Amino acid sequence: MAPIAIPTSTPVAVASKAPAVKSPDPDTTNGKLSPALTAMFHNWSTFSFAPIRESTVSRAMTRRYFHDLDTHAESDVVIIGAGSCGLSCAYTLATLRPDLRISIVEAGVAPGGGAWLGGQLFSAMVMRKPADVFLRDVGVPFEDEGDYVVVKHAALFTSTVLSRVLGMENVKLFNATAVEDLITRRHHEGDGEDGEEGEGKIRVAGVVTNWTLVSMHHDDQSCMDPNTINAPVVVSTTGHDGPFGAFSVKRLVGMKQIEKLGGMRGLDMQAAEDAIVKGTREIVPGLIVGGMELSEVDGANRMGPTFGAMVLSGVKAAEEVLRVFDL
Ligand code: 48N
């Protein structure tokens, strides 16, 4: 068999660095510290914190946390996974619908998923256009390289989206908390896809949660029952790898709601990103899947170290939620 002709790759001229597109100036004091902070310099000998009792700190944390647990026990939307897709969905949805009560459940202590670095531990993050539209909306500065843009450090993207999302009144992040199952209802509305009775078909109606450390030790501890969050719509963006990767779609196979997973295919940037964004959808009633978790159910290619599909899949997932709500 003739050897495969490998196209001789001509070195790509490095595009001249366009000036970084600056996000709107944050409300700094134009590079100066406030007078109150400046006054601290050289006055440490007389410095002292206001008095406090330990129980005051404990109550300040627990009172708020249990109030949030109580309030969000009934949420309008739960987003599983605070990676680049889940956070982009949360930003879009919470911006469009500040009336919706949105819970984000993230297994890691640190939200952000795989978006703290660009690829192979390099720090710059690449996004193909038109994903720069999202960066402008959120206010993430980037260098414009023509068909793609570069955020100088992936953590700049993730921390900016995180700060926007966490600053929104209608969003609560429950991190270090794993979704370890889905709340379901029998879905009797009409026939199933292939004409059977609705028997066996389910509608997702919320999530089952536990502290992640507990979820990871069910095999070596006696039963440690979970908690729950009811919600009519769940968005699952749990990624394709990691200890809980592709969580919800694997659960759907276990519940016989989908026959089997398509399994993520090899890396093909060009094919993968369009497929993930266009394929973001409601997989079973009440459950929308986006980001790299979708590659596992659809058998889409992976795209490697480019994140445009993650943010725009999050935007599309938000649109799918609104479609369900506006039904
Ligand atoms: O960043 P990920 O893993 O997932 P996405 O889809 O937001 O972004 C994927 C992206 O980082 C890539 O993989 C890039 C583009 N590479 C592609 C390639 O070809 O390699 O975030 C998922 C988040 C993580 O923070 C997990 O901790 C969390 O979801 N998570 C969960 N949180 C709560 N409960 C669970 N059961 C659960 N499972 C995962």
Image: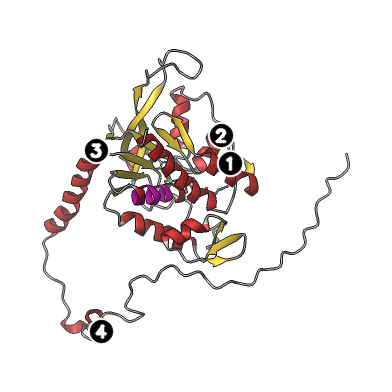
Query: Which numbered mark, 4 or 2, is in the foreground of this view?
Result: 2
Q: Is residue 193 visible?
A: yes
The kind of residue on which mark 2 rests is: Asp
On the image, the x and y values in percent for residue 324 come to 38, 35
- Labels 1 and 4 touching (C-beta < 8 A): no
In the image: residue 164, left or right of residue 17:
left
Quarter of the figure with residue 36: bottom left
Mark 3 within 8 Å of ligand 1, using the beta carbon: no
The circle drawn on residue 275 is 1
What is the crowding at mark 1: few (fewer than 14 residues within 10 Å), some, or many (at least 20)? Answer: some
Which residue does the image show at 81% across and 57% down from the upper left?
Answer: 8
- Labels 3 and 1 touching (C-beta < 8 A): no
**Residue topped by disc 3:** 73
Query: Which numbered mark, 3 or 4, is in the foreground of this view?
Result: 3
Magenta stretch, residue numbers: 86-95
Image height check: is 140 above or below 37?
above
Q: 324 or 12: nearer the eye?
A: 324
Q: CA distance from mark 3 to mark 4?
A: 46 Å
The kind of residue on which mark 4 rests is: Phe
- Numbered disc 2: secondary structure: helix
**Residue topped by disc 4:** 41
